[in-house]
Amino acid sequence: MVCVVTGGAGFIGSHLVDALVAQGDPVIVIDSLSAGSRDHLAGHLEAGDVNLLPYDLLGDGWQQALEGAERVCHLAADPDVRMSSVSPESQIRNNIIATFRVLEAMRNGSAREILFTSTSTVYGDAMILPTPEDYTPLEPISVYGASKLACEALIASYCHTYGMKAWVYRFANIIGSRSGHGVIPDFIGKLRKNPRELEILGDGAQSKSYLLVDECVDAMLFAAEHAKDSYNVFNIGSEDWVNVTTIAQIVCGELGLRSVTYRYTGGSRGWIGDVPKMQLAIDRIKALGWSPKRGSRESVQEAVRAMIR
């Protein structure tokens, strides 16, 4: 199957490209390289297994790449939840408008299948934990979450209007090698600058589900293989959670630091739009036959080791 991967030079995107190449799919990556890195794809580019088009989805010139493609994996986005309260226009343009442009290119081309990476933040401060896919009301508390929910609605409408097929994935916190965003690289960076003190946003009690990126990609492809509805929505995460202070302890331990002072900024939220408690119900994908192999704590430990390396 010829696959186009937007954001394929990024964190999750490049791991997805690895998996697609491994199963023998021809892959075209569209990535502006503003956040992604050509280095993530270097081996595939040298082998000729991947064609990289360095385009911004808000511009033109990339649409012809969808001609002859069968499936689009749309991962390109502005993922910064914290900054979405400061500069919301970036989220609107790079998430909603970019997704609309991808759907339009699909409508005018040959691709009729789309895999879309959404987020657990579409649920907002959910009153039911673990949170199932049919939870209501969906009330995002960040512009980022709202932008992803808007993308989901656009994709659903194109599926029903134009005969497309979609798999939408609401992720827990996905972690692992090549990640430059989130609590783990934040802690590693801070501790390398000052190994005696670590600033922790909020009160450190924020508890969330974490999943390694290789398992995330495996779940995405498994669901796309086994779920056959025209519009499919799946939560993807682990079945437990870990709090921020525990993550700080794991990072300090892996860095060999034993006497670090934690300095909390206070409050239940680390920033505007932060969801203090998040755990997803994954019964829907488990019913298809997929389950995570690791829990949140083990995932964090492996991710920290990978990032330190």
Image: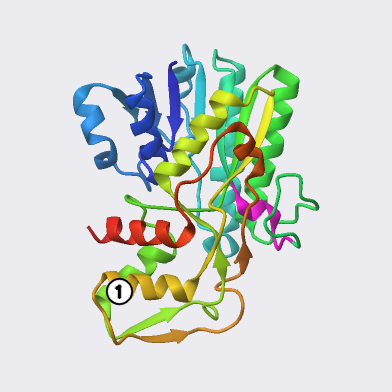
User: Residue drawn 76% across and 45% down?
Assistant: 134
- Residue 133 in view (yes/no): yes
User: Residue drawn 47% across and 28% down?
Assistant: 60
125 is within the stretch colored magenta: yes
- Say which element carries label 1: helix
Front residue of 251 and 97 = 251
273 is within the stretch colored magenta: no
User: Residue drawn 46% across and 17% down?
Assistant: 64
Is residue 69 shown above or below 114? above
Percent across and percent down for residue 162 are 70, 18
Count of residue discs? 1
Front residue of 215 and 88 = 215
- Residue 32 in view (yes/no): no
Percent across and percent down for residue 267 are 60, 81
Residue that carries the numbered disc 1 in the rendered image: 253
The quarter in which the C terminus is drawn is bottom left
User: Residue drawn 34% across and 57% down?
Assistant: 302
Left or right for 55, reference 122? left
Toward which corner of the image does residue 229 lie, by quadrant? Answer: top right
Q: How is the image coloured?
A: rainbow
In magenta, the rendered stretch is: 119-126
Which residue type does callout 1 highlight?
Gly
Toward which corner of the image does residue 240 lie, by quadrant? Answer: bottom right
Percent across and percent down for residue 223 are 56, 31
The quarter in which the N terminus is drawn is top left
